[in-house]
């Protein structure tokens, strides 16, 4: 199999049994890899209704055909499982080096069943897998865990692990590799913790087989000189460079989504790219990346002490910054460091801090509740102090450690009005009042609240009509096409930023065909993306979950509208948008079930039969 190693590893943590399975090429061509392949496998092998934190949940680490190859952006892997945060399908992807080295170790994916009675980690060393004791690692942060394992098995060992937050089953815990690259969303770090699985360590030197290596390298060489989209800016500043622009445009949430930058946070320029680049020691790139949008930071030596790690991304800056009315750069660095070392999603953590500040302002919680920490807007010392409590699940942080939905339930007194989440998953730093399509992604994607499903860019020539940020109706078909293509880009293991920078959709398809030996067209890829989206969505439908019954908090969709800033007066009818998504995807506009006929057309007749049983 070209582009694939051709093997899956299954690890039964209860029985301490490891088995290999040959990967079926037809399955790969149908569901590609990543969350598509993962969703298909879990749908078949896991019954509905399982507790996400029970031994019955299956957890997977899955790569794609671009991962570990010369294809531009081929560094990603995806963690999959049933989300303990939302109860829906869960997936989270990350860059760095872990994904490529999982393939170099001999496998396309590894799935964990059961649960260990004591802390363990998995080591895959050049095709040989072993479950090892992790008693000495339990309680360690993610940085120390990585260092300890690499010191024992060599610097060419790559590690994906959880920190203390995952061990303590924080529902907003993620999986961390390369000291700050994070598969952060869906709370899958808590699933690792529930299985007593501290880490997965991989090393190997087996190259990924390519159908036409000469052509793959030729495409790479040619496209490197033609990258457009965000590549130029991200080479210089990474995503930190878009914070000021997006905040002024109206995309970045302000004051727990209740305010506007112009009136509530006019000091946004204090969080410009230079403020973060001044604290950086060198650029960082994931495996063979030509953009290298990351940055390795100096150790904190001022008011806040933090270890060398990755530069905060836009989502982190936007949510620990404007959303908390915080303009202190080093406090954002410290909060980012706490989340990375303890293994917590920065999007959820920062949103939970903003929620806490508003609850404090409204009198729902007091200084006595917070252990003496004054949770006031822009109080960077309190923001850092409470973030530390959250990641450690200590004091009032124990109330917050599972995100805004659980925190609101614990606080009561109407706190749910200020909890900015979709079915438990906190929103990314993108405002649907600015770009209507985020309303569709937040509500209708199988992973609720997903910040990478909206008006993201796409290669030239993919979408025949422009996606209008200001229109909130009549764009269902164009949005479907974009989302379906993006599904495949993620499932092959390609970075979104690199994908968005490709000079055309044909380039992406040429890479895929040269790697695999397939003969796909752009329309084939769009259909594969629809199949993947239907597969993820079908997981939820079988669980009895209908996204049409999910709803955003009022302020997220402009109820009441803001009175200042670029989003002033704007309201979004998410029900109209949701209906258009259903119509474009051929989902029933009441039950959200995929059309039986369309599933059969996509080669998913067996899935249609399963969904027919759902009442």
Image (cartoon, rainbow, N blue to C red):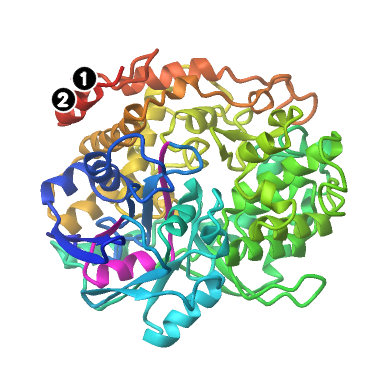
Cβ atoms at labels 1 and 2 below 8 Å apart: yes
Residue 519, image x and y in percent? 13, 46
Could you say where residue 386 lies in the image, as x and y percent from the top left? Answer: 75, 55
Q: Quadrant of residue 211?
A: bottom left
In this rendering, does residue 538 appear at all?
yes
Q: Which residues are magenta?
A: 88-113
Residue at point 38%, 35% (across, down): 482
The percent position of residue 499, horizontal first and vertical second, equals 39, 50
Q: Residue at x 73, y 40 (%)?
A: 355
> Which quadrant holds residue 120?
bottom left
Q: Is 200 left or right of 144, judged from the image as shown?
A: left
Residue 67 placement: quadrant: bottom left
- Residue for badge 2: 600
Q: Position of residue 452 (x, y in %)?
A: 48, 42
Disc 1, SS: helix
290 in the magenta segment: no
Which residue is at a point 43% across and 82% down the rendered structure image? 150
> Measuring 12% from the left and 54% from the top, which residue is drawn there?
517
Of the pair 391 and 313, the residue shown nearer to us = 391
* Disc 2 secondary structure class: helix
Query: Left or right of 131: which side holds 89?
Result: right
Label 1, label 2: how far apart the Cα atoms are: 6 Å
Relative to residue 263, is residue 477 depicted above or below?
Answer: above
Q: Is residue 547 above or below residue 276?
A: above
Q: Across the whole image, how many numbered discs are drawn on residues?
A: 2
Residue 549 badge: none
| Left or right, residue 282 beside residue 411 | left
Q: Which residue is mark 1?
A: 596
| Viewer-closest of 3 and 22 | 22
Q: Quadrant of the C terminus?
A: top left
């Amino acid at each position: 199999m070209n582009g694939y190693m051709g093997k899956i590893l299954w690890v039964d943590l209860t029985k301490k049994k490891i088995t290999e399975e040959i990967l079926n090429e037809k399955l790969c061509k149908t569901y590609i890899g990543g969350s598509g392949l993962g969703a298909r496998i879990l749908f078949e092998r896991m019954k509905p209704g399982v507790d996400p934190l029970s031994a019955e949940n299956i957890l997977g680490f899955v790569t794609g055909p671009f991962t570990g190859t010369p294809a531009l952006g081929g560094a990603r892997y995806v963690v999959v499982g049933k989300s303990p945060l939302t109860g829906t399908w869960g997936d989270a992807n990350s860059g760095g080096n872990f994904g490529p080295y999982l393939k170099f170790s001999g496998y396309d994916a590894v799935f964990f069943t059961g649960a260990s009675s004591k802390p363990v980690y998995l080591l895959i060393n050049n095709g040989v897998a072993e479950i090892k004791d992790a008693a000495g690692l339990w309680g360690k942060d993610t940085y120390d865990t990585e260092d300890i394992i690499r010191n024992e098995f060599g610097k060419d060992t790559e590690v994906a692990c959880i920190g203390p937050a995952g061990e303590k089953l924080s529902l907003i815990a993620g999986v961390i590799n390369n000291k700050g690259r994070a598969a952060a969303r869906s709370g899958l770090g808590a699933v690792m913790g529930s299985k007593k699985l501290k880490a997965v360590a991989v090393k190997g030197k087996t190259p990924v087989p390519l159908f036409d290596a000469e052509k793959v390298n030729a495409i790479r060489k040619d496209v490197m000189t033609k990258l457009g989209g965000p590549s130029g800016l991200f080479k210089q500043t990474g995503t930190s460079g878009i914070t000021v622009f997006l905040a002024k445009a109206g995309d970045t949430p302000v004051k727990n989504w209740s305010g506007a930058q112009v009136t509530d946070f006019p000091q946004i320029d204090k969080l410009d790219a230079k403020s973060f680049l001044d604290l950086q020691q060198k650029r960082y790139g994931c495996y063979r990346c030509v953009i290298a949008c990351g940055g390795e930071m100096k150790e904190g030596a001022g008011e806040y002490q933090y270890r060398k790690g990755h530069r905060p991304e836009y989502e982190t800056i936007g949510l620990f910054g404007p959303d908390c009315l915080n303009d202190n750069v080093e406090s954002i660095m410290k909060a980012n460091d706490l989340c990375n070392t303890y293994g917590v999603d920065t999007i959820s953590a920062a949103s939970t801090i903003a929620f806490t500040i508003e609850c404090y302002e409204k009198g729902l919680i007091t200084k006595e509740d917070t252990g003496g920490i004054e949770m006031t807007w822009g109080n960077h010392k309190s923001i850092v102090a409470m973030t530390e409590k959250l990641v450690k699940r200590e004091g009032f942080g124990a109330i917050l450690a599972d995100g805004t939905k659980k925190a609101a339930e614990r606080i009561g007194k109407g706190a749910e009005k200020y909890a900015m989440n979709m079915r438990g998953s906190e929103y990314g730093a993108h405002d649907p009042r600015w770009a209507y399509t985020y309303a569709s992604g937040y509500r209708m994607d199988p992973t609720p609240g997903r910040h990478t499903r909206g008006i993201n860019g796409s290669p030239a020539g993919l979408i025949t009509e422009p996606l209008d940020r200001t229109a909130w109706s009549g764009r269902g078909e164009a949005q479907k096409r974009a989302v379906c293509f993006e599904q495949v880009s993620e499932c092959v293991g390609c970075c979104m930023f690199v994908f968005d920078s490709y000079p055309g959709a044909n380039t992406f398809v040429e890479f895929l065909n040269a790697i695999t030996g397939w003969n796909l067209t752009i329309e084939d890829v769009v259909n594969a993306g629809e199949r993947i989206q239907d597969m993820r969505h079908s997981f939820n439908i079988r669980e009895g979950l209908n996204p049409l019954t999910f709803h955003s908090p009022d302020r997220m969709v402009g109820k009441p509208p803001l009175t200042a800033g670029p989003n002033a007066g704007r309201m979004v009818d998410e029900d109209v948008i949701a209906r258009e998504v259903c119509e474009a995807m051929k989902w029933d506009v009441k039950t959200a079930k995929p059309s039986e006929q369309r599933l059969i057309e996509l080669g998913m007749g067996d899935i249609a039969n399963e969904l027919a049983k759902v009442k």
